Image: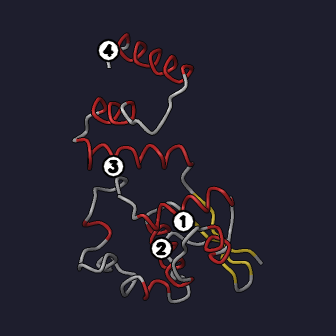
Amino acid sequence: MVRRSPSRHRVDGADRAAGGNSGRSRKADGFGHSLADHEPAGRETHSRREREIMEALYKLGRATAAQIQAQMPEPPTYTAIRTHLTILEKKGHVRHESDGTRYIYEPLVARDQMGRRALESLLRTFFDNSVERAVTSLLTREDVDIPREDLDRLARLIDKARAEGR
């Protein structure tokens, strides 16, 4: 029988491993901060491991923690994967279904939407919210050849943004 997870749940002890109880004051980062202490709602940052887990889950579509772990190049322990999945579920990025004793996870947020959120975080963190600085950084990389078609498309997008007053 397959059961969908409720909005608040406990995943086989992974909740305890993530830092304690499942209440709002749960300490998730190891520094005494709850998840809500880091970013305003909907603007959470993601750890490297959370991004790697989401990348694996996007490739697989639906998967168990063991399948996600097998997809990762340098995976953490199975328990760490389950802990991160619980955190991602609490953030609203994944959900699980019970299939007997297994949990099957799937993304709740589309890959392109998750990418936009990651870019917003990147802009805030490293480029002081400057699109120009971020694009300049990408265009001046010497280790990447940008195809002419891509440059033409970018030029059209810039012209369109300029015409729209953005």
Residue beneath the point at 39% across and 36% down:
141
Type of amino acid under label 2: His
The quadrant the N terminus occupies is: bottom right
User: Looking at the picture, does residue 103 appear above or below residue 89?
Assistant: below
Type of amino acid under label 1: Ile
Type of amino acid under label 4: Gly
Marks 4 and 2, how far apart in space? 41 Å
Marks 4 and 3, how far apart in space? 24 Å
**What residue sits right under mark 3 in the picture?**
121
The local crowd at label 2, few if under 14, some if 14 to 19, many if 20 or more residues have their Cα within 10 Å, is many
* Helix, strand or loop for disc 2: helix
Marks 1 and 4, how far apart in space? 38 Å
Q: Position of residue 160 (x, y in %)?
A: 43, 14
Marks 2 and 3, how far apart in space? 19 Å
* Helix, strand or loop for disc 4: loop
The quadrant the C terminus occupies is: top left
- With 20 as the anchor, is 32 left or right in this view? left
Nearest to viewer (mark 4 / mark 3): 3
**What residue sits right under mark 2 in the picture?**
84
**What residue sits right under mark 1 in the picture?**
53
Q: Are marks 1 and 2 in contact (CB under 8 Å)?
A: yes
In terms of sequence position, does the residue under pointer 1 or pointer 4 come before the other?
A: 1
User: Looking at the picture, does residue 149 appear above or below residue 125?
Assistant: above
In terms of sequence position, does the residue under pointer 1 or pointer 3 come before the other?
A: 1
Marks 1 and 3, how far apart in space? 18 Å
**What residue sits right under mark 4 in the picture?**
165
The local crowd at label 1, few if under 14, some if 14 to 19, many if 20 or more residues have their Cα within 10 Å, is many
The residue nearer to you, when weighing 68 against 87, is: 68
Marks 1 and 2, how far apart in space? 8 Å
Q: Position of residue 161 (x, y in %)?
A: 38, 18
Residue beneath the point at 26% across and 63% down:
38
